[in-house]
Image (cartoon, rainbow, N blue to C red):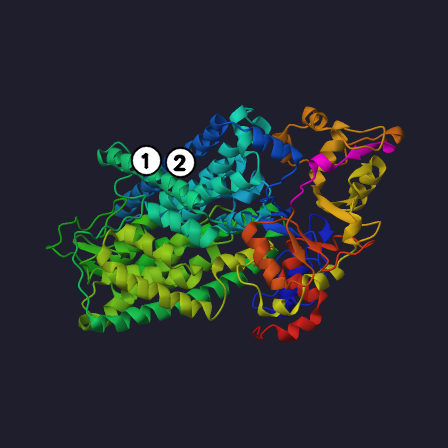
Amino acid sequence: MEEDLHQIINSCNYNGEEEEQGDPESNTLNQPLVKANRTLSSTPLALVGTKVSHIESLDYEINENDLFKHDWRKRSKTQVLQYIFLKWTFACLIGLFTGLIATLINLAVENIAGYKLLAVGHFLAQERYVTGLMVFAGGNLGLTLVASVLCVCFAPTAAGPGIPEIKAYLNGIDTPNMFGATTMIVKIIGSIGAVAAGLDLGKEGPLVHIGTCIASLLGQGGPDNHRLKWRWLRYFNNDRDRRDLITCGSAAGVCAAFRSPVGGVLFALEEVATWWRSALLWRTFFSTAVVVVVLREFIEICNSGKCGLFGRGGLIMFDVSHVTYTYHATDIIPVMLIGVIGGVLGSLYNHFLHKVLRLYNLINQKGKIHKVLLALTVSLFTSVCLYGLPFLAKCTPCDPSIEERCPTNGRSGNFKQFHCPKGYYSDLATLLLTTNDDAVRNIFSSNTPNEFSMGSLWIFFVLYCILGLFTFGIATPSGLFLPIILMGSAYGRMLGGLMGSYTSIDQGLYAVLGAASLMAGSMRMTVSLCVIFLELTNNLLLLPITMIVLLIAKTVGDSFNPSIYDIILHLKGLPFLEANPEPWMRNLSVGELGDAKPPVVTLQGVEKVAKIVDVLRNTTHNAFPVLDEAEVPPQMGLGTGAIELHGLILRAHLVKVLKKRWFLTEKRRTEEWEVREKFPWDELAEREDNFDDVAITSSEMQMYVDLHPLTNTTPYTVMENMSVAKALVLFRQVGLRHLLIVPRIQASGRSPVIGILTRQDLRAYNILQAFPHLEKSKGRKAH
């Protein structure tokens, strides 16, 4: 049955283009939702959000052509200082705007959800339970409808958390329309609607995406159609600097979600960034510091009662700095047990979520209406469960020794009356009939060992396991952090209750450790999660046991399947390059890999226009080696006819040449001033590869173009006998788009370049399609 499901998914028609059929890929994930071609260098499609898009690689390599070198030489100290000043200014603005938008989202969610819960409480007080359900479910359906319609109709890339696409972008994959103004606006409004609707999803993932959208828009001077033409912005008109800004944006987003500045920096370093350096560390830290200042000011204002129903909600804060926790050597056993449970449950969650996402893909392919109906169905199911299940719980008498008001039917509080008589509260309603942030605060509460019964905690845990699987994947902005925290805190608190007098650790702390273990078991993060939870709890005494739990949970989870973000990356078909090459890649050389590809297409240093037009029309390559006849001294003994590799020219630059009609009537090399007159250096950073609207006359076809000034004269090259594993490490760490293969022996009449490697050529799946015999050695270790 499962194989049939895979075949259905892989045979689906995307945008009218049917994908090629084939055998399942032999790994734990089987096939991606958008199946790759069997050819070694395929041009893939991938899901970006919920939209099928054409994927290209980014140019993180510095293009050292003559124009760049001239501009670099003539830059004054003032211009260098402008560039550095603008980097820090953007880092500050990223933090400022991310903090303000996070404030807006928190205020909107808490007030919308607060008034909805007050209205429901009014009907509960009158014992009009059916009317209360209709108001509760109707409000949630309306909010979900707004979020879903916006994502489906206006910005499909705003659906989901956005973190896998951000990881892919920082890995060198261009994700179209992912960081646009429309996407950001829909993400903000959609997050408010989806979270206020009580769906089992968080705003943490969307805040990371929003932070990166802010960073990208600042770097490019605004939306695509309304960009600022400010002269200073030209320094950031390249993929390298935009990558740094988006890294700052991702750190600021995590900081805004958890008020965790150091945790945000470490999240960017550990989870999303492929490339890192010390200067980037300082700027991301500066961005998160600005976010914290903004949120601190916002909390001060709200504490004075100027934020409506915000109160203590909206920011997951579990401050236990005033609580003194004690634990002994005997407590290590339950702590280790929490880590093992978190690793097992985290890997199970990843496994079942993988199946659910495949199923949802089948439904979403049926059209926009089905996407909206799926979201509304999940919303209705969630509303009925949140409202109906508390009727199954027993009413608990209020403890008169507790200072907090009991019972209450207000928006928040630890003791919801719900249907109970006066003087009693429903512990399950306290957890379910509230916002997700307040639910976390309630279940994390310390010194309340008897507040929640074991039966209510079991119902809460099972419900959020179901909702966590079926809510993620609908067409709304959604985050994974909060659902996992809610599930983990439930089994953590249950384990604390079962330990009873055996342990001295508070049940609230067990809930915190359970949430941390499940996050590590599913997301496979350790250092950043440890710091995030320390900054949330504001208590360094928790550091040792938190570290133990995270390390055990990650180790156990890794033994079963990849992290949840890696699974989503694969399902979406994004060609992400992992840090560690497969062991069998050392058995294959890049020369053999190049032989499996079509012959490399080269151009001469001074090339005919007709040849350039023919190459652009008949190939989809994004770069071409530029060759010249070498002037070799006789004493070198290479003979006549030797050819040298001048460099590599990008397709976008060839299109730019044709559009500007920079043609020569005779075959000659141009002077330096001729090029600078026609091509400003910053203009070459723009991507312009649309060749369809270029009209070349027959007389122009016979003219020539001097490609030397536009050619990158220092491309990265590897010897043909280098292993694929070593080439992959170089390709990923430097952030390349093209890697040239050169022969070991330079001989007269032999081409100095025998192949070009791209991202697709270095993917394990594509290599195994071209070299099936390597399948047998996948599990062997390299000697």
Q: Residue 294, labelled with which disc? A: 1
Report helix, strand or loop for mark 1.
helix
Q: Position of residue 694 (x, y in %)?
A: 78, 32
> If you read the primary sequence from the N terminus, does the residue marked by circle 1 or circle 2 appear first?
2
The answer to whether one can see residue 600 in this image is no
- Residue under pointer 2: 101
Q: Residues within 10 Å of mark 2 (few under 14, many from 20)?
A: some
Q: Which residues are magenta?
A: 701-714
Q: Is residue 377 magenta?
A: no
Amino acid type shown at disc 2 = Ile
Q: In this picture, is 334 found above or below 263?
A: below
Q: Position of residue 363 (x, y in %)?
A: 59, 55
* Residue 142 locus on image (x, y percent): 45, 41
Q: Residue furthest left?
A: 401
Spot occupied by residue 154 in the image (x, y as percentages of width and height): 56, 38
Q: Is residue 494 visible?
A: yes
Q: Which residue is located at x 40 percent, y 53 percent?
A: 481
565 is higher (above) or lower (below) than 289: below
Q: Amino acid at mark 1?
A: Val
Quadrant location of residue 606? Answer: top right
Q: Residue at x 70, y 65 (%)?
A: 769
**CA distance for labels 1 and 2:** 10 Å
